[in-house]
């Protein structure tokens, strides 16, 4: 019998679960996974969800033909789940081990903790704080660190702890130890470089692999490093942009999360580029933080999959 999508052939399961058995206020969960691609992998893990009564509300998948990796993101709730979340975690961990799966599974209301890092420019910081306060960014901001003290009044107005960590060539290792200690104390999940103008050491990048995000003020891979707007103006570009990416030891070459561009013409000066660019940088970084907070970003051998 061919597997057809003609409604006449759909089987109608009359065994509906009575509404009375549904939980009145179900808890939402998000599961994001990556594993070696093979026939049946989706059936296995969606079967596990079904067996535990998970009610799926959003799902997306991707199989990369080059890296042979499979990616999936599922939002579900427990309206029909009879087991505890802990029991589901245990059972899913067993399946994940069998399928050699990397995964993140958490209740949606358990928001990722962010430590923001800034220097003197406040446009990206302002956007993140405004969107956090309005609830548009589902995150918990546990603190802001900076190598300067300029932005303390802004941060403390929001009631967020401000950590002034001055840096010099001689004190860079100690200052980075302070950053690590802060991340540990606050249990921060991510370090967000919101125009933090210091190059992180190779060892810090290694320790923060997949957890540090930067906003670069150019449409990478063009114009890496310092003063990208000056480089772009000298080149006579017709678009300028911003790139949010994971931080790696290779400056501005980390996996890209999202990018935005805006047209410019021959009349635009470098300072005009900077004014236009600040808006693009701020919104691009906020978009990247939202995607990461919603567990939509998975690393894929130097690139990312956005689900
Ligand atoms: N290891 C990495 N560190 C950082 C990255 C990265 O991709 N890998 N991105 C940068 C951000 N950045 C451009 O977006 C950038 C920041 C700073 C510099 C730089 O030359 N800094 C000097 C000091 C400048 C100063 O004191 O004002 C330095 O660190 O010696 C270049 C590019 C964030 N870090």
Image (cartoon, grey):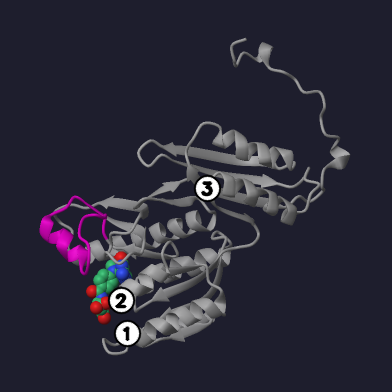
Query: Residue beneath label 3, please?
Result: 100
What's the mark number on residue 198? 2
Ligand 1, image quadrant it occupies: bottom left
Q: Is residue 117 left or right of residue 48?
A: left
Please name the residue shown 33% across and 86% down the image.
167
Mark nearer the N terminus (2 vs 3):
3
Q: Say what secondary structure mark 3 lies in.
A: loop
* Residue holding disc 1: 172
Q: Is residue 83 left or right of residue 38?
A: right
How far apart are the two marked residues, 2 and 3, measured between alpha carbons? 37 Å
Residue at the far front in the pictured view: 98
Marks 1 and 2 sit apart, C-alpha to C-alpha, by 10 Å
Q: Residue at position x 38%, y 68% from top?
A: 206
Which label's residue is closer to the chain start, 1 or 3? 3
Could you tell me which quadrant the N terminus lies in? Answer: top right
Q: Is residue 193 visible?
A: no
Q: Is residue 23 left or right of residue 233?
A: right
Some atom of ligand 1 lies within 8 Å of the CB belonging to the residue at label 2 = yes
Decide: few, some or many residues near mark 2? Use Cα within 10 Å; few <14, some 14-19, many ≥20.
some
Query: Residue 303: x percent and y percent?
Result: 35, 50
Residue 153 percent coordinates (x, y): 47, 84
The magenta stretch is 218-240
Image point 77% across, 45% down: which residue?
81
Q: Residues within 10 Å of mark 3 (few under 14, many from 20)?
A: few
Tell whether 225 sits left or right of 46: left
Q: Is residue 7 above or below residue 37?
A: above
């Amino acid at each position: 019998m061919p597997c057809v999508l003609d409604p006449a052939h759909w089987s109608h399961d009359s065994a509906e679960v009575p509404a009375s058995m549904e939980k009145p206020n179900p808890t939402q969960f998000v599961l994001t996974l990556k594993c070696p691609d093979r026939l049946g992998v989706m059936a296995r893990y969606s079967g596990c969800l079904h067996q535990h009564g998970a009610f799926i509300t959003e799902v997306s998948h991707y199989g990369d033909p080059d890296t042979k990796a499979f990616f999936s993101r599922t939002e579900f709730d427990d309206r029909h789940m009879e087991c505890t979340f802990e029991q589901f975690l245990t059972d899913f961990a067993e399946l994940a081990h069998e399928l050699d799966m990397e995964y993140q599974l958490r209740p949606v209301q358990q928001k990722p903790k962010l430590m923001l890092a800034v220097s003197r420019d406040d446009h990206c910081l302002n956007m993140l704080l405004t969107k956090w306060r309005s609830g548009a960014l589902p995150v918990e901001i546990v603190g802001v660190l900076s190598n300067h003290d300029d932005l303390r009044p802004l941060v403390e107005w929001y009631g967020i702890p401000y950590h002034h960590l001055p840096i010099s060539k001689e004190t860079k290792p100690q200052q980075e130890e302070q950053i690590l200690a802060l991340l540990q104390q606050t249990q921060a999940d991510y370090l967000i470089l919101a125009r933090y103008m210091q190059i992180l050491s190779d060892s810090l990048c290694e320790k923060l692999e997949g957890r540090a995000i930067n906003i670069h003020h150019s449409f990478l891979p063009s114009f890496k490093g310092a003063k990208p707007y000056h480089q772009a103006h000298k080149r006579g570009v017709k678009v300028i942009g911003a790139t949010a990416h994971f931080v790696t030891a290779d400056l501005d070459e980390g996996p890209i999360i999202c990018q935005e561009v805006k047209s410019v013409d021959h009349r635009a000066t470098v300072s005009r580029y900077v004014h236009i660019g600040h808006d693009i940088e701020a919104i691009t970084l906020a978009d990247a933080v939202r995607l990461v907070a919603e567990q939509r970003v998975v690393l894929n051998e130097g690139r990312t999959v956005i689900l």
